[in-house]
Image (cartoon, helix red, strand yellow):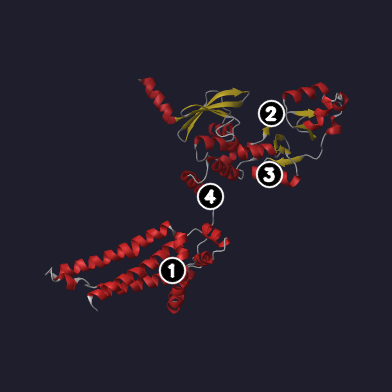
């Protein structure tokens, strides 16, 4: 075979090797989600790619057989391919051989391996779909050889109890990573980003993070006077009020403002004398161990939008409405950057209400996690957990490059915390020192 014939043969081998390289990388990199969308649109080739991903054994065996055959043939044909040509200019045969070897090796590295694989990484689905039929024919042609090698590989996997196909389990972290990447690329808008994050947070937040706490509940008793009822409605214009027999733990039912206000407006004062007549007894009562996602399911099942939350001792710890859950879900979307309990005082400084949920604090301060988060629900609970005592004014701790200081306490209850980023705090100390 002359030098021209060898060069044509090498070129053909480079193209074959590029085909196998692109097929291998594109199949491994093709995203199942995108392929499934193409299948739903009726793309038959995308379905074939998915089938190969689910059972990749024969495919990768064929690729390796093809690449090795090409490498052997390239070594045979390319051996000293340029030596006859270079001998006219270079008398040293060793140097001539090395130049010839470098030429063939470089051509394969660049055009049979590097460029095809980089293209396959950039356009994995497109290339996988384009090559899937050709790979199917190649697999059939090499079936006898594939059967032997694939059978040996499967036996080895069986001996070591190793799965032969990958499991693409999509986790919350995977979805968050995709959403973050979409937000950085501008594909996902800021509001959409916040909404998706909030949806997944519903599985992690307890009902207590969105409820009205026990000490803030406005309720009526069965012995409540007309004047007291009207005064409470005027001062606290809620849509629903808890009704109790004597104290907050003796639940009787609930009453809606829409049932009370018409009587007041019509002057039917006597209608308020016996609140039992307009009290709804069928009240939804739930434990404080539910998440907000569970709470949505309970509201849906009961066709209610108001519930009372009890602890393990059957004491009322709070009430929650459907609007409370929706506000948690839509808060950053409807009211961007509006934190009711978190006030930013300046760069690296925040005033935080003690009842603020730790999830909200984590989001604002960009803290990955708090220690033993299941042991408390609010930032006040975090302080009590870390200090191992009832905090007093001035008590502080340092955690994750932040200092948390209690600045206001009301009857053993932490009202406000001052949170300062330590870098800023150190700068202030340096300036004072100067």
Badge 1 is on which residue?
60
Res 245 seen here: no
Res 276 seen here: yes
Q: Position of residue 74 (x, y in %)?
A: 29, 72
Q: Mark 2 falls on what kind of element? A: helix
| Mark 1 crowdedness (10 Å alpha carbons): few <14, some 14-19, many ≥20 | many
| Mark 2 crowdedness (10 Å alpha carbons): few <14, some 14-19, many ≥20 | few
Q: Mark 3 falls on what kind of element? A: helix
Mark 2 or 1, nearer chain start: 1
Instruction: From the viewer's side, name the closer residue of 297 and 221.
Output: 297
Q: Give the label, 2 or 3, closer to the camera.
A: 3
Any mark on residue 216, and which? 2
Mark 4 or 3, nearer chain start: 4
Q: How far is the residue under mark 4 from the one under mark 3? A: 22 Å
Instruction: From the viewer's side, name the closer residue of 374 and 420.
Output: 420
Badge 3 is on which residue?
296
Q: Where 144 falls versus 29 (above or below)?
A: below
Q: Position of residue 41 (x, y in %)?
A: 57, 61
Mark 3 or 1, nearer chain start: 1
Mark 2 or 3, nearer chain start: 2
Q: How far is the residue under mark 2 from the one under mark 4? A: 37 Å
Q: How far is the residue under mark 2 from the one under mark 3? A: 22 Å
Any mark on residue 175, and which? 4
Circles 4, 3 touching at the beta carbon (< 8 Å)? no
Q: Mark 4 falls on what kind of element? A: helix
Q: Give the label, 2 or 1, closer to the camera.
A: 1
Instruction: From the viewer's side, name the closer residue of 396 and 118.
Output: 118
């Amino acid at each position: 075979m002359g030098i021209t014939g060898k060069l044509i043969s090498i070129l053909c081998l480079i193209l074959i090797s590029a085909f196998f390289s692109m097929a291998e990388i594109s199949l491994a990199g093709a995203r199942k989600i995108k392929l499934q969308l193409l299948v739903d649109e009726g793309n038959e080739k995308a379905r074939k790619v998915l089938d190969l991903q689910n059972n990749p054994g024969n495919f990768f065996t064929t690729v390796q057989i093809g690449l090795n055959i090409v490498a052997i043939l390239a070594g045979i044909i390319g051996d000293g391919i340029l030596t006859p040509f270079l001998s006219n200019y270079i008398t040293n045969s060793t140097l001539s051989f090395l130049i010839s070897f470098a030429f063939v090796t470089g051509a394969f590295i660049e055009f049979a391996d590097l460029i095809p694989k980089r293209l396959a990484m950039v356009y994995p689905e497109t290339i996988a779909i384009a090559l899937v039929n050709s790979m199917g024919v190649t697999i059939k042609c090499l079936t006898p050889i594939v059967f032997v090698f694939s059978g040996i590989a499967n036996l080895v996997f069986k001996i070591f109890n190793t799965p032969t196909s990958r499991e693409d389990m999509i986790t919350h972290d995977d979805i968050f990573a995709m959403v973050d990447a979409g937000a950085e690329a501008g594909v996902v808008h800021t509001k959409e980003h916040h909404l998706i994050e909030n949806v997944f947070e519903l599985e992690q937040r307890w009902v207590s993070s969105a409820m009205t706490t026990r000490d803030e509940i406005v309720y009526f008793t069965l012995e409540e006077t007309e004047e007291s009822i009207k005064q409470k409605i005027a001062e606290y214009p809620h849509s629903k009020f808890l009704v109790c027999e004597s104290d907050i733990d003796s639940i009787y039912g609930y009453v809606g403002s829409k049932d009370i206000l018409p009587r007041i407006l019509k002057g039917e004062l006597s209608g308020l004398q016996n609140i039992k007549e307009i009290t709804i007894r069928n009240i939804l009562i739930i434990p404080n161990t539910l998440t907000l996602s569970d709470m949505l399911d309970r509201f849906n099942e009961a066709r209610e939008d108001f519930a009372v939350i009890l602890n393990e001792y059957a004491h009322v710890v709070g009430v929650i409405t459907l609007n409370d859950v929706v506000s948690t879900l839509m808060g950053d979307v409807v009211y961007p950057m509006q934190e009711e309990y978190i006030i930013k005082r300046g760069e690296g400084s925040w005033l935080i209400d003690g009842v603020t949920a730790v999830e909200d604090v984590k989001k604002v301060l960009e803290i990955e996690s708090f220690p033993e988060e299941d042991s408390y629900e609010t930032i006040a609970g975090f302080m009590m957990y870390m200090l191992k005592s009832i905090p007093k004014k001035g008590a502080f701790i340092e955690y994750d490059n932040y200092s948390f200081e209690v600045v206001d306490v009301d009857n053993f209850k932490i009202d406000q915390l001052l949170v300062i980023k330590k870098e800023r705090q150190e700068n202030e100390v340096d300036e004072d020192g100067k």
